[in-house]
């Protein structure tokens, strides 16, 4: 798809910002030409302002870019945001008002009625909220968000169950330390330990999937009418959030029906062969001890959600394990895929 589109990254020096830089370095549609960060980094070259924490070297194409202040003006029309929640509202709104399309990993606008909370394989039709957003707010641009890093694999894994009527589900997360940013959790706290609390995490996991799995009706999303309970834990894993899930359904499909639905689950990204889309967005693994973060998190550049151990639940109906790479499919990669879908819809 041509011509190529120049893009920028807000919050480019942080862990998710670095993932954006890595994912966009050789992107077939997007050219990363602008990076923004805090005032103390502005004016420096990206390589001088950034302590690179990802595996491998910093991409040469971004290393010598000059870091800008996070203010609209000279930035490209399309910007990806990994801004800290403390400052994201004001900055992202300023960019949207100025005519920029902000594809945000930040939580601040996710639950606004006129802002899409997007997982392209699950709710691509929610992009229609952009028109309402511009009417409501008078913005020349707009904001599209991707979900919390646990909500993404949870929504993808639950999507094949939706047609059977999801009544309730309970999930327990085992979340990687990279989800806490850098330097993350002190080693004396996490090594040989499990921390059964992540500030603000459980409310997001309990509400965001309901919007993602909800139905767009007219000018609003009608959330999935299901009860949810979440337990969120930090564990000594570098990358990859693992979830155990038990779900109760209105209808009672067989194991064979569910497995067939899971293995055949696809969405618009796969139909349109979007560059970041994994060929199989939800990959079922039949081994009893899978998925595992180290072995399965990196699949398809971190964009595949893996699932296993589907079996009857003695309290609800079914239970399973799923896994998603938290800083790729649960953050930067999700936002890039959102932008690819928007481009394929002619919205950029």
Image (tube, rainbow, N blue to C red):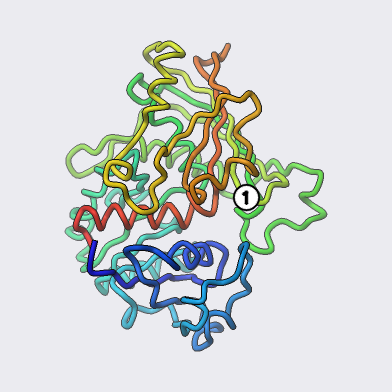
Query: On screen, 110 above or below 80?
Result: above
207 left or right, relative to 311: left
Q: For the C terminus, which image quadrant?
A: bottom left
At a point 46% along the width and 61% down the height, the residue shown is: 23
Circle 1 sits on which residue? Answer: 239
At a point 58% along the width and 35% down the height, the residue shown is: 243
Query: On screen, 337 above or below 167?
Result: below
175 left or right, relative to 34: right
Q: Position of residue 93 (x, y in %)?
A: 34, 67
Q: Nearer the viewer, residue 308 or 78?
A: 308
Q: Position of residue 258 (x, y in %)?
A: 42, 19
Q: Count how many numbered circles sit on residues in the image.
A: 1
At a point 79% along the width and 43% down the height, the residue shown is: 193
Q: For the N terminus, which image quadrant?
A: bottom left
At a point 50% along the width and 29% down the height, the residue shown is: 284
Q: Position of residue 32 (x, y in %)?
A: 39, 72
Q: Residue furthest bottom?
A: 43
Q: Position of residue 247 (x, y in %)?
A: 49, 22
Neighbour tally class for label 1: few under 14, some 14-19, many 20 plus, Cα within 10 Å: many
Query: On screen, 122 above or below 65?
Result: above
* Local secondary structure at mark 1: loop
219 left or right, relative to 62: left
Query: On screen, 299 above or below 30?
Result: above
Residue 322 occupies which quadrant of the picture?
Answer: top right
Q: Nearer the viewer, residue 27 or 65?
A: 27
């Amino acid at each position: 798809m041509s011509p190529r589109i120049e893009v920028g990254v807000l919050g480019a020096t942080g862990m998710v910002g670095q993932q954006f830089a890595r994912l966009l370095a050789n992107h077939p549609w997007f050219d990363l030409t602008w990076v923004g960060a805090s005032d103390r980094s502005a004016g420096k070259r990206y390589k001088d302002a950034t302590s690179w924490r990802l595996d491998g070297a910093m991409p040469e194409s971004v290393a010598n870019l000059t870091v800008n202040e996070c203010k609209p003006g000279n930035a490209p029309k399309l910007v990806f945001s990994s801004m800290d929640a403390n400052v994201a509202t004001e900055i992202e709104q300023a960019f949207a008002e100025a005519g920029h399309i902000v594809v945000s990993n930040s939580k601040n606008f996710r639950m606004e009625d006129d802002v899409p909370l997007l997982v392209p394989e699950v709710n691509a039709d929610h992009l229609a909220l952009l028109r309402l957003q511009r009417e409501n707010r008078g913005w020349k641009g707009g904001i599209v968000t991707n979900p919390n890093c646990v909500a993404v694999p949870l929504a993808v894994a639950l999507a094949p169950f939706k047609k059977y009527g999801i009544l309730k589900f309970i999930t327990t997360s085992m979340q990687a330390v990279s989800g806490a940013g850098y330097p993350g959790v002190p080693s004396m706290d996490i090594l040989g330990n499990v921390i059964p609390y992540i500030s603000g995490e459980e409310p997001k996991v309990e509400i965001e999937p309901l919007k993602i799995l909800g139905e767009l009706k007219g000018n609003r999303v009608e959330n999935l009418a299901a009860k949810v309970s979440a337990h969120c834990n930090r564990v000594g894993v570098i990358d990859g959030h693992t979830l155990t899930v038990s779900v109760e359904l209105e209808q009672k499909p067989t194991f064979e029906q569910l497995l067939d639905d899971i293995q055949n689950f696809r969405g618009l990204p796969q139909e349109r062969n979007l560059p970041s889309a994994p060929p199989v967005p939800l990959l079922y693994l039949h081994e009893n001890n899978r998925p595992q973060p180290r072995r399965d998190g990196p699949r398809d550049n971190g964009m595949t959600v893996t699932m296993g151990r589907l079996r009857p639940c003695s309290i609800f109906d079914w239970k399973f394990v799923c896994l998603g790479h938290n800083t790729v499919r649960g953050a930067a990669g999700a936002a890039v895929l959102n932008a690819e879908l928007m481009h394929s819809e002619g919205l950029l």
